Image (cartoon, rainbow, N blue to C red):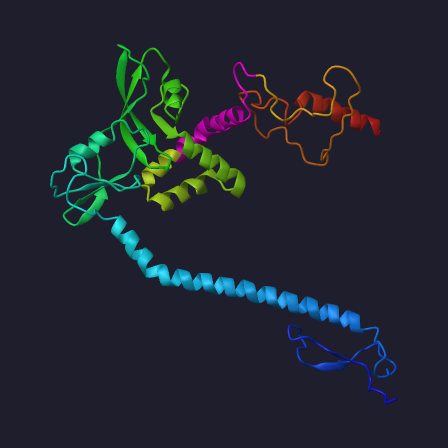
């Protein structure tokens, strides 16, 4: 029987040594042709795995290439469609059907309606979301400014009064508005019912959209950014003026945002006045009336504890759900200290 040469190994095309043949390092004897090789199964599995991986990679590249080519084919059409959408499509008011020379367009409405000045103001009187209106005048595009109104009095009352305020909408845009309040309800409660958070607990002169504050709170937790950087992001995103962003930042850092975060926590967990629902902190396995409770905790006792790190004028908003009382910790540390003496 004719004998074969030394056992060799050919690497697949996807490997580092593609197409090259080398003696197998553990082959110390020659094999007869027709004899089953102990390495045949191993090499076949590895070749099949490499082939499958190569096919999967090729398929992924082909899908990426097809998607990129499809986007490239649409690029000029999408650009043209967007440019056409930011300019008025006609010179006639959609509300009163009169021909206008200085059309006003609402950028927040899906249909991008065209108004004359009077119809634009009228369309926004009952819109508490404060849509962004732009006016086209002498070939220039600018923000359409007018006296906005917000009716915070949700009932018929003879004790109504007007108050000038600065309002930040859900995009962070600032508006000077006239708010209608009444003496039957506190101003702060009336603003919350309209979807805006007051800047102070007494006699607020500014209100911030609750939707905007929820976005800031979520962005703060997810990205670990500072309030200052988040306000700067709003500035670049919507082209907000520097003085408006500075005013918003000062308002948020004046205990306003911290109180809103606690308010948002209470609302999210259905906690508050008249509500006694589990907020998720109690252990579901521990007995509530009778039985043994096994307590386990962990702490980094080696951390430096500074007595002058600052004080708070109010008790903890979350009580002892996250941290234990400082007097209890002092007693525990003294016990640990004396137990090791």
Which residue appears at 81% of the width and 73% of the height?
Answer: 39
**Residue 272 visible in the snapshot:** yes
Main structural element of the magenta stretch: helix, strand or loop? Answer: helix
Q: Is residue 195 magenta?
A: no
In x, y percent, where is residue 152? 32, 20
Name the residue nearer the viewer: 234 or 294.
Answer: 294
Residue 318 percent across, percent down from the top left: 58, 24
* Residue at x 40% of width, y 18% of height: 189
Q: Nearer the viewer, residue 338 or 271?
A: 271
Q: Is residue 310 above or below residue 100?
A: above
* 335 vs 202, nearest the viewer: 202
Q: Position of residue 1 (x, y in %)?
A: 88, 89
Per the rendered image, the range of residues in magenta is: 249-275
Extreme residue toward the bottom, this view: 2
Residue 224 in view here? no
Residue at the spot 45% in from the left edge and 36% down from the top edge = 215
Which quadrant of the view contains residue 158?
top left
Q: Position of residue 89 (x, y in %)?
A: 20, 47
Residue 293 vertical position relative to residue 9 in the rendered view, above or below: above
Image quarter of the C terminus? top right
As drawn, 327 above or below 120: above
Q: Image quadrant of residue 59?
A: bottom right
* Side of 260 where 87 appears, left or right: left
**Residue 269 falls inside the magenta stretch:** yes
């Amino acid at each position: 029987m004719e004998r074969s040469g030394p056992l060799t190994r050919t690497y697949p095309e996807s490997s580092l040594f593609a197409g090259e043949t080398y003696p197998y390092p553990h082959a110390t004897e020659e094999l007869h042709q027709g004899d089953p090789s102990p390495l045949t199964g191993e090499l076949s599995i590895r070749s099949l795995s490499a082939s499958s991986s190569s096919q999967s990679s090729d398929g992924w590249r082909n899908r990426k290439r097809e998607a990129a080519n499809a986007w490239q084919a649409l690029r000029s059409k999408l650009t043209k469609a967007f440019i056409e959408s930011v300019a008025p499509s006609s010179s006639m008011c959609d509300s009163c059907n009169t021909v206008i020379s200085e059309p006003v367009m609402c950028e927040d409405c899906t249909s991008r309606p065209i108004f004359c000045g009077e119809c634009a103001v009228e369309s926004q009187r009952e819109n508490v979301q404060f849509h962004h209106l732009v006016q086209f005048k002498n070939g220039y595009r600018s923000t359409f400014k007018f006296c906005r109104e917000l009716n915070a009095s949700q009932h018929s009352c003879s004790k109504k009064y007007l108050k000038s305020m600065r309002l930040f909408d859900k995009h962070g845009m600032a508006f000077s508005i006239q708010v209608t309040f009444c003496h039957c309800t506190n101003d702060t409660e009336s603003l919350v019912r309209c979807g805006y958070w007051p800047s102070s607990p007494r006699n607020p002169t500014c209100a911030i959209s609750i939707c905007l504050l929820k976005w800031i709170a979520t962005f703060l937790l997810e990205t670990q950014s500072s309030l200052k950087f988040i306000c700067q992001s709003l500035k670049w995103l919507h082209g907000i003026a520097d003085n408006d962003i500075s005013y918003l930042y000062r308002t948020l850092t004046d205990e306003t945002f911290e109180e809103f975060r606690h308010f948002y926590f209470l609302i999210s967990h259905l906690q508050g006045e008249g509500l006694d629902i589990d907020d998720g902190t109690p252990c579901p396995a521990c007995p509530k009336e009778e039985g043994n409770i096994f307590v386990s905790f962990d702490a980094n006792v080696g951390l430096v504890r500074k007595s002058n790190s600052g004080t708070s004028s109010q008790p903890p908003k979350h009580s002892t759900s996250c941290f234990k009382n400082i007097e209890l910790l002092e007693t525990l540390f003294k016990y640990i200290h004396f137990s090791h003496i």
